[in-house]
Image (cartoon, rainbow, N blue to C red):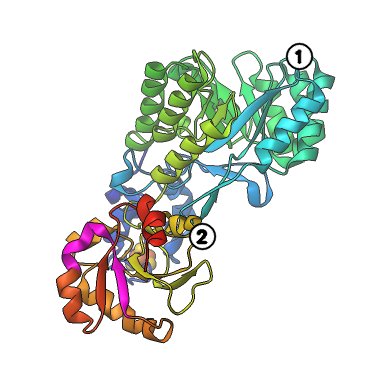
Amino acid sequence: MALSGLDIYKLLPKTNCKECGQPTCLAFAMKLAAKQADLSACPYVSEQSKAALAAAAAPPIRLVTVGTGDKKVEVGNETVLFRHDKTFFHRPGLFVRLTDRMPLAEFEAAVGRIKDYGIERVGITMRVDGIAIENASGDAATFATYAGAAAAKTDQPLVLVATTPAAMAAALEKVGTAAPLIHAATAENWKEMASLAAKYKAPLAIRADNLQALAELTEQVKGTGVEDMVLDPGARDLHGSLVALTQLRRLALKSNFRLLGYPIVTFPGEGAESVQDETVRAAQHIAKYAGIIVLDHFEPAIAYPLLTLRQNIYTDPQKPIQVSAGIYEMNAPKPDSPLLVTTNFSLTYFSVAGEVEASGKPAWLLIVDSEGMSVLTSWAAGKFDAEKIAKSVKQFDVPSRISHKKIVIPGLVAGLSGELEEELPGWEIRVGPREAIDIPAYLKAWS
Ligand code: SF4
């Protein structure tokens, strides 16, 4: 049961020393109750109070790690139902399921393809996170061979999917030190699976077909000392999984129901009528509220939109991704090459820079600090105006790099021309395309 702010206050030193960054112990207690502060910020809490406060200080959704090293996937520890309330912190891991019934060479080639896939967007390389291996053969030795083959081919995290503890034990003997996710403990096998999870210090997925049964199982598994769990509520269809995942998130955050305060694993391909249907389900799980998503198909045409959606949802809405302001060289420009100006919103920068590069035409790109906003948004907010552009021209010493006095502004803010002429006397203000895609044609016609 969560403690109220007043309950927490009774356990604090009540000296109001402010070392925690709050003006009073009561204010700190309220922050703790709202999960907006960490107990460690107060250096004076007694050990006895610490134990009593542990329940209130623990995150409502446990942080669980799958894998080891720099490719490990951390999921959970979310604090809000809606991204705009604060932000989502740990993006869901995307895994691709392969089975031990595939020819081994084909399996290894698929592992390699998934590992090597990466695509850059707004300066960030997006990747699928790991491989799930299913014991479709039913044979423990075969499962172990395929798990070992996957681990030999990739250092990405693994999910092991098997129903029998014997098969799971065989695979863990090969890859247990890599902390794979064990899927899954059920009402039938939870004791053996929990014992394997404890032995290898690996996270354990708990599977049941309703939330009541799921909570009972997590309680039993917790009783064995296993703390790192992931929930599989069994629902597979769009409506059922939306309801189950939303209830789980609400119970964890709003009711502080610890037995269901764990990340969730989903299998969008199960029951899907087509690859497109699977992709739609996976998209829903990214938005609400999966921690691990195991796909049954891998193609760039599926991965790219899902990775893009994940990137968009798991960025802090209050901190737009931005690039540094400055003057950028595109295709080795010369002093007489064109000068284009735009904002420092990452998506804007990479769209414009990508088109300039693709044109093959040398150019200078002046990036103005618009606090990470796009062209129209920053113009409307007064962050991208004639004064700022003129200031950037001077700040980055543009006249020393070019031999002309022509500057191309985005077509969307053509109305800035007059003001910019006043700010940059003697310069010719040209209006460029409204859309980045039209930049190559514009540069080819440049004179
Ligand atoms: Fe109170 Fe501890 Fe904060 Fe000092 S540091 S004001 S004792 S909660």
Q: Is residue 398 left or right of residue 151?
A: left
Q: Which residue is mark 2?
A: 360
Nearer the observer, 196 or 316: 316
Say above or below: 118 vs 261.
below
Q: Amino acid at mark 1?
A: Ser
Q: Residues within 10 Å of mark 2 (few under 14, many from 20)?
A: some
Q: Could you tell me which residue is drawn at 49 percent across and 12 percent down?
A: 273
Q: Which residue is mark 1?
A: 137
Residue 414 painted magenta: yes
User: Distance between the Cα atoms at labels 1 and 2?
Assistant: 53 Å
Mark 2 sits near ligand 1, with its Cβ under 8 Å away: no
Q: Residues within 10 Å of mark 1 (few under 14, many from 20)?
A: some
Q: Nearer the viewer, mark 1 or mark 2?
A: 2
Q: Is residue 327 left or right of residue 222?
A: left
State the image quarter where residue 336 is shown. Answer: bottom left
Q: Upstream in the sequence, badge 1 or badge 2?
A: 1
Q: In the rendered structure, which segment of residues is drawn in magenta?
A: 405-416
Q: Amino acid at mark 2?
A: Gly
